[in-house]
Image (spheres, helix red, strand yellow):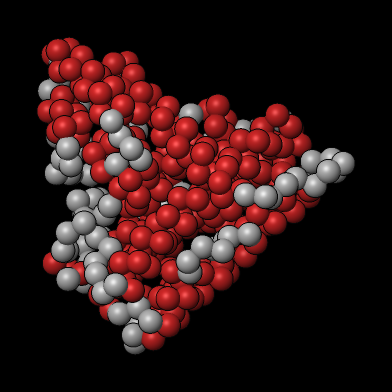
Amino acid sequence: MRIPEPRGPVSSALFQVLAQAPDTAGPGLDGLYSLVVRQLAGSGDIISDEDIQLSLFCLYELHYSGLDGVSDLWEWEPALISVRRLIEEPFEAALRAAAYQTAGNFELPGGVAMTSDAVADVLFGLAATDTGPSVSRYVARKATLDQLKEFLVHKSMYQLKEADPHTWAIPRLSGRPKAALVEIQADEYGGGRPERMHSALFARTMRGLGLDDSYGAYVDAVPAVSLASVNLMSLCGLNRRLRGAITGHLAIYEMTSSQPNRFYGNGFRRHGFGPEITHYFDEHVEADAVHEQIAGRDLAGGLVEAEPQLLADVLFGATAVMAIDSRLSAHLMSSWEAGQTSLRAAVPAAA
């Protein structure tokens, strides 16, 4: 991915450091660490902090496809990992606070052993409590062509590398949950056929609307909350201690995906787009109806059966994604209903 435009002092300093070789960047790294400490202390809401979320997104990107012109040696540079961990701590704390608020009065059933079926029932119950603004219904009934393009731009930050954050969990699981995750991911990656990878299907949809389908093409356009939704996945996927959270995240993702994707597809059909463009959404209507059972019972449920102490983390991952998605949905809806763009700046292809 190309290096984005900085959004403040932290991202500006980070990009200056990354332009150097790790063995010559000592003073810059020390300065970056101190700067992050000061900026975090003054950040009122880390989830909507443009500078911090962009910096964290790019730090995580070193573990994915990398950044153009940046040495791969930076990936495991201890001083840079320290900077990332410095940001992760308050970010995770904010996510846990948001997740707690989202859970509200939801309580675990008393006196019930947390079998895989019981865990799945709890997750389905959580999914049913989601009463946030419905972007999918808006897309189906009202969204303009420009808003459809904006919708794709937001989603492109994850969908063009769809499934990758959850794949980090595979070597951290064993037995039933591992087999379940591999089964789900095999579908996400097209069952061995690259043209059927879900990321490839999404790229085809973007091209059909005249958008740039190269990964990260619109990183400068999306706001912090869009980056935070992807950073949540990377946080849970890259940290082994949060393996329960990434399974809960995936379970809720699958459980709340099928019907919205039906609405998304209808919204694109309303504007005259055919199967070539709607295939991505139509594929998820069918696939996620199956995946939700596997993710709820065999993946998340199987993990809790094997490691009961991870139940709280599974629920954290599930409620955190609900909280962040609700914030992103509220941003989209408030922008569109006010006749404004939901992006940070005009995008030529979506203007």
Task: Residue at 35% x, 78% y: name it.
Answer: 143
User: Residue 322 appears at what percent x and percent y?
Assistant: 53, 52
Furthest residue in direction right, as rendered: 111
Q: Is residue 121 left or right of residue 149?
A: right
Q: Nearer the viewer, residue 160 or 105?
A: 105
> Quick one: quadrant of the N terminus?
top left
Q: Is residue 181 left or right of residue 341?
A: right
Q: Is residue 180 visible?
A: no
Residue 176 lies in quadrant: top right
Q: Is residue 174 left or right of residue 53?
A: right
Q: How many marks?
A: 0
> Quick one: quadrant of the C terminus?
bottom left
Task: Residue at 18% x, 17% y: name it.
Answer: 31
Q: Is residue 155 visible?
A: yes
Q: Is residue 74 above or below residue 344?
A: above
Residue 218 lies in quadrant: bottom left
Q: Is residue 273 above or below residue 182?
A: below
Q: Nearer the viewer, residue 106 or 283?
A: 106
Task: Residue at 58% x, 60% y: name it.
Answer: 130
Q: Nearer the viewer, residue 275 or 222?
A: 222
User: Residue 280 appears at what percent x and percent y?
Assistant: 43, 68
